[in-house]
Amino acid sequence: MPINVYFAAGAARWPQYEAPLKAAFAEAGLDVALSNAAPDPAAVDYIVFAPNGDISDFTPFAGCKGVLNLWAGVEQIVGNQTLTQPLCRMVDPALTEGMVEWVTGHVLRHHLNTDLHVLNQDGVWRNGAVPPIARERPVTVLGLGELGRACGRALAALNFPVTGWSRTAKEVEGIRCLSGEDGLTEALAGAQIVVLLLPLTAGTENLMNAERLAALPEGAVIVNPGRGPLIDDDALLAALDAGHIGHATLDVFRTEPLPAAHPFWAHPKVTVTPHIASETRAPSASRVIAENVRRGEAGEPFLYEVDRARGY
């Protein structure tokens, strides 16, 4: 009997994922019947899902062994009371690489003050603006999950002094690791550039409020490719207008697409990028999905299973 996998991640993604998923299942030696058509729920063994996909009520899928999310973030689904099956978030090697590239690029952009020259091609020879070297520019990464650790290591390899903060204590080679409320205050106090890579939970929403923005050194830069609601938008705008925060480069927002009238678009100290810091890549993500189906069939623990109590 084939393993029945229901692709419920949205019709728009089906052409992108159909062939890579079939190839990954074959490569893993799995006999899979893959479909994006509404199936008999009782026959479904696994669901490939995205939060804006095809289903919101998981109750009929009583025999489903696992819901395999295509996104790294699960905040839009983890609280669904009908979802009692194991839920796995996506940790895609290519997604991680893409995030490292985006974060490193923008940290270097702010460190080197590249905008001063790129945005001012006006005939003025601005050779007096010389940045410090990387080891003189402290960077703090908030969030030491898969993405935060990878970005922190990449920045440390460029000689930035990197401090990482997480809600629970962690150890990452080459990174000074802090945790807890006192650790957060210390991590912010020494940061000239802050990178936000925390999951969105009740405990992290509005983490960067007026008080914590004020704890940063004057002129500090915020780089947020994590989750929009990690930042209190009004507090950030006030800190930018007051000159306490030097710049904010934002890839994620409370409402996406970011409304055209939102003040972030026109603010001279804000760079908006349209949620492009990193994308799940179908070929590599499909191999992660196939591995979790293999594990489920073999009775092995799933990769990246979500802890419902923690929310990620």
Image (cartoon, helix red, strand yellow):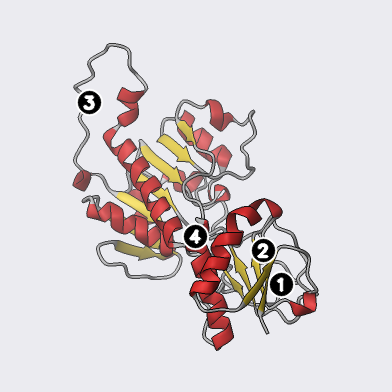
At a point 70% along the width and 78% down the height, the residue shown is 64
> What's the CA distance linking mark 4 and mark 1?
27 Å
Lower position in the chain sequence, tag 2 or tag 1 = 2
Out of 69 and 144, give the one closest to the viewer. 69
> What's the CA distance linking mark 4 and mark 2?
24 Å
At a point 37% along the width and 41% down the height, the residue shown is 106
Give yes or no for contact between labels 2 and 1 (Cβ–Cβ under 8 Å): yes
Q: Is residue 202 visible?
A: no
Q: Which amino acid does label 4 sit on?
A: Pro
Q: Nearer the viewer, mark 3 or mark 4?
A: 4
In this rendering, position of residue 199 left or right of residue 114: right
> What's the CA distance linking mark 2 and mark 3?
47 Å
Q: Which amino acid does label 2 sit on?
A: Ile
> What's the CA distance linking mark 3 and mark 4?
44 Å
> What's the CA distance linking mark 2 and mark 1?
8 Å
Lower position in the chain sequence, tag 3 or tag 4 = 3
- Residue assigned mark 3: 129
- Residue assigned mark 1: 83
Instruction: Give the image location of residue 104, x and y in percent.
Output: 34, 47
Q: What residue type is labelled 3?
A: Ala
Give yes or no for contact between labels 3 and 1 (Cβ–Cβ under 8 Å): no
Q: Which amino acid does label 1 sit on?
A: Leu
Helix, strand or loop for disc 4: helix
Lower position in the chain sequence, tag 4 or tag 2 = 2
Q: How many labels does the image show?
A: 4
Quadrant holding the C terminus:
bottom right
- Residue assigned mark 2: 77
Dot label at residue 283: 4
Helix, strand or loop for disc 1: loop
